[in-house]
């Protein structure tokens, strides 16, 4: 009887701890959580509304960990579908959490980021006019020594 009680007690105490130890770290979810904390600052600084962000994942710094780039567009607070700005925040995976390390620089063209493959960040340049769906060409970027570089 005492052995059953010990076993029962062990299961009651150990089961919640095992669940905590098995929690999954999601780079995408962690990056979005960090971005959403900062989103009100972006909106205040730009007097705009940040639309639902897009996240692409992949290893951008050759460390074998899944990094994230959170991209967003801003629209006017007064309405309409005109984009008044855009940006992309870069989050590196430290192995235990995500760390924001910078943003994409301004380019003289409109683009969105599509995917990451073999440390190459693939984007598509599009016409900077509504309905924002005419693709002009593909673009490639790399993350080198803390900076985004366009590949030609």
Image (cartoon, grey):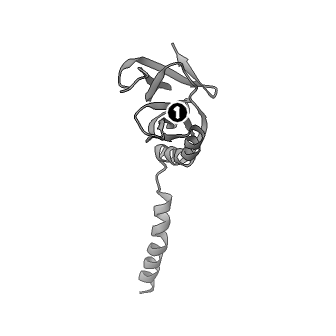
Q: Residue at x 58, y 43 (%)?
A: 44
| Up-down relation of residue 119 to residue 151 (above or below) | below
Mark 1 Cα-neighbour bin, 10 Å: few <14, some 14–19, many ≥20:
many
Work out which residue is located at the far front of the displayed protein and give it: 78
Q: Which residue is identified by label 1?
A: 88
Q: In the figure, residue 8 lies in which quadrant?
A: bottom left
| Up-down relation of residue 148 to residue 27 (above or below) | above
Work out which residue is located at the far right of the displayed protein and give it: 145
- Toward the viewer: 69 or 46? 46
Q: Residue at x 52, y 37 (%)?
A: 65
x, y percent for residue 24: 46, 52
Q: Number of numbered discs present?
A: 1
Q: Quadrant of the N terminus?
A: bottom left
Q: In the figure, residue 38 lies in which quadrant?
A: top right
| Up-down relation of residue 140 to residue 80 (above or below) | above
Q: Residue at x 38, y 26 (%)?
A: 130
x, y percent for residue 89: 55, 35
* In the displayed structure image, the side of residue 106 where residue 80 appears, left or right: left
Is residue 122 shown to the viewer in this render?
no
Work out which residue is located at the far top of the displayed protein and give it: 152
- Toward the viewer: 103 or 14? 103
Q: In the figure, residue 145 lies in which quadrant?
A: top right
x, y percent for residue 75: 46, 36
Work out which residue is located at the far bottom of the displayed protein and give it: 1
Is residue 87 shown to the viewer in this render?
yes
- Toward the viewer: 79 or 107? 79
């Amino acid at each position: 009887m005492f052995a059953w009680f010990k076993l029962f007690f062990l299961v009651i105490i150990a089961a919640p701890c095992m669940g905590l130890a098995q929690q999954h770290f999601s780079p995408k979810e962690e990056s979005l959580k960090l971005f959403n904390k900062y989103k009100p600052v972006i909106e205040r600084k730009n007097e705009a509304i940040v639309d639902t962000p897009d996240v692409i994942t992949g290893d951008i710094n050759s460390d074998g960990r899944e990094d994230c780039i959170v991209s967003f567009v801003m629209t006017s607070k007064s309405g309409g579908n005109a984009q008044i700005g855009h940006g992309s925040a870069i989050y590196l995976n430290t192995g235990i959490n995500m760390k924001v390390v910078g943003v994409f620089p301004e380019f003289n063209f409109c683009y969105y980021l599509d995917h990451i493959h073999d440390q190459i960040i693939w984007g598509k340049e599009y016409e900077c006019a509504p309905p924002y769906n005419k693709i002009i060409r593909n673009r490639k970027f790399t993350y080198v020594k803390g900076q985004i570089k366009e590949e030609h």
